[in-house]
Image: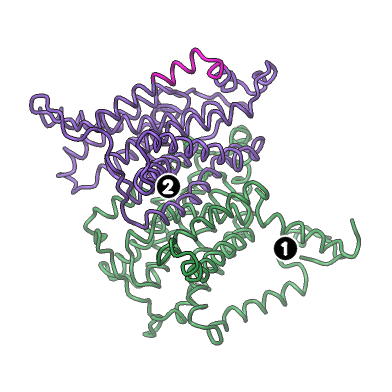
Chain colours: A purple, B green
Amino acid sequence: MTEFLQLLISGLMEGGLYALLAASIVLVYKSTQVASLAHGQILAFGAIFLYIFLATLHLPLVIALILAFAATALMGLLIERTTLRPLIGQPLFSSFLVTFAVFMLFDGIFQLIVKGGTLTIPHFLPAGTLHAGALMVPAGQLCSFIAALILFGILGLMFRYTKVGLGLRASAENHQLARSTGISVKQIFSIIWVISALVACVAGIATANVTDIYYTLPQMGIKGLIVALFGGLESIPGALIGGIILGILENLSAGYLDPVVGGGLKEVAAYIMLLLILLIKPYGLFGLVRIERI
Amino acid sequence: MRPCGIFDERYTQDMAILRTKQHWALLVGALILLYLFPLFGSYYLVSFLNNLFITIIVVLGLQIVSGYCGQISFGQPAFMAVGGYASAILTLKAGVSFWLALPLSGLIAGVFGIIGGAPSLRIKGFYLAIATIAIHFVTMWLILHLKITGATQGLNPMPPEIFGFPLDTDERMYYLIATVMLIMTFGARNLVRSKVGRAFVAIRDNDLAAEVMGMNLYHYKLLAFFISCFFAGIAGSLYGHLIMVVHPEQYTLTHALWYVGMIIIGGMGSIPGTFFGVIFVRVLDELVLFASPFLSEAFPWLGASPAAALGLSAFGLVLIVFLVFEPRGLAHRWEIFKASYRLYPFAY
């Protein structure tokens, strides 16, 4: 029982980070209809920027964090302006593929920086482990999980109560109608990319704080896409639930099934889960079911 | 490619691939050049061409399922691995001759492709693309964890023999690979203008409309996956016997991205476009390989061996440029050139 609860808790902590990345993908998809793989790179570069400012330039933590956020936001903005805006009006699939191209472009740069090894960010989240009975919770992971939950709350409030959020919701609903009420859809696209880049950056910094910057970090982007598909591409609560389910499932399968099948199941649990859910519910748990016309 | 003033009078003329005497002369010349190449080409060029031809076979398969049938698949390297392993297991453990194992490995990969293509019955677009990524990872995980595939060790297939004469060097394998490549190209070129090929195009353009017109969507989608994986299996088998190793490391998701990128750069829905795309990307990759030692000398922070990473970045950049400025690929430029050649010396 203790082992089960322990796996559940570590799954929850990992799932929070998946959920954060998935939320950044869902944000972009909701308003621009583009499912983006590039967020895996934004996440990785968020961590890289922090590494540069904190470990190489030895800036104070707060300034380094602010600079890393600014750099990541700029990166998101650049991706949107140079690759996705020229493709407005083209088939949506081109936009999807261009995010793959962006992924590869940045993956090359990422590999040049990491050089197949690991970069360690000076850990700034509290170290040590919290004990609750026989259960152990690493304090750093708990902090980033709470940060993820707070960020989800902020996103929800922003969508609900601010003027920008209103514009985002309107343009997600219908580009034409949003434009006729005086909302600049292009501006909305830029804003949404900046916001989602910031969310991905938080996820990246939190991940790197737990696992360091290893050379396959950008492939988290695929996990993020899977969680987003699992929860439904239009649904932010779906991203949260999907992320947590994936995290728990990965840890449970690693804990209980790995001795049976011989290890490494954690890597493919997500993919098996995705294949099953796509066969049962093709649009994810909370996704909109699209009705097509000829 | 036909000059001004030649007109088609019969249906067979209109459908012919080779229309004029010049075409035949070009074809024969190209074939002679192709088969005599190892006599004067360097070892480096021959092994480069071997890899190029194998890539062409894989990408032809991808072109059929993605370019013609519109089902984007990132599973091609996984099915190539299935073909490679099938061929290695058949020749090493079952004692089957390579010449039987080659088509069999294509068929086995094709059957796996039907299983892998099953999600296309329910989903499409990028949902399907992500599902094929999932299929890639699950397949590679299975290969890594099964006993029969040699797990992390991989397998070492022997070079094929023909009448006791082993094809154990790159020059000798070249003839086999070039021949298979020609047969597969011929097959693909004819498939896409047959009833099946037209059904694929109809499904790509609008699957609902195609279904309403009475096409069996499931049948044709699965057929497209079968054919594309057959190509991948054949290529995997050839590749395994060429380098005498099949190992999970050879078939990564990055390869899938490269293959999809090749058909975008070459042009979706065009067999000549496949050739343009593969040649363009491979040559670009070789250029980066040549340039990287100089770059790493000029910019020491790039590290000792930046070739792989630089190649990835260069490829991503080229792909972005093509998607933004020429989404119809090099094949579209080729069509424009052909049209203007046919009209020359008139303007229209």
The number of callouts visible is 2
Q: Position of residue B71 (x, y in %)?
A: 53, 44
Return the chain for callout 2: B
Upstream in the sequence, badge 1 or badge 2? 1
Q: Which residue is located at x 39 percent, y 62 percent?
A: B104
Residue ranking furthest to the right: B346
Q: In the image shown, does A179 or A56 lie closer to the viewer?
A: A56
Q: Quadrant of residue A87?
A: top right
Q: Quadrant of residue A129?
A: top left
Residue tagged 2:
B114
In screen coordinates, is B342 left or right of B321? Answer: right
Q: Secondary structure at mark 1?
A: loop
Q: Quadrant of residue A127?
A: top left
Q: Residues within 10 Å of mark 1 (few under 14, many from 20)?
A: few
The residues tagged by marks 1 and 2 sit, at their Cα atoms, a distance apart of 32 Å
> Which circle marks residue B16 in the picture?
1
Q: Amino acid at mark 2?
A: Ile
Residue ranking furthest to the bottom: B39
Q: In the image shown, does B213 or B145 lie closer to the viewer?
A: B145
Q: In the image shown, does A96 or B268 lie closer to the viewer?
A: A96
In screen coordinates, is B279 left or right of A140? Answer: right
Helix, strand or loop for the magenta stretch, by majority:
helix
Q: Amino acid at mark 1?
A: Ala
Q: Position of residue B224 (x, y in %)?
A: 51, 49
Q: Residues within 10 Å of mark 2 (few under 14, many from 20)?
A: many
Highlighted range, magenta: A153-166
Q: Say above or below: A112 vs A294.
A: below
Screen quadrant of the N terminus of chain A? top left
Q: Say above or below: B166 vs B314.
A: below
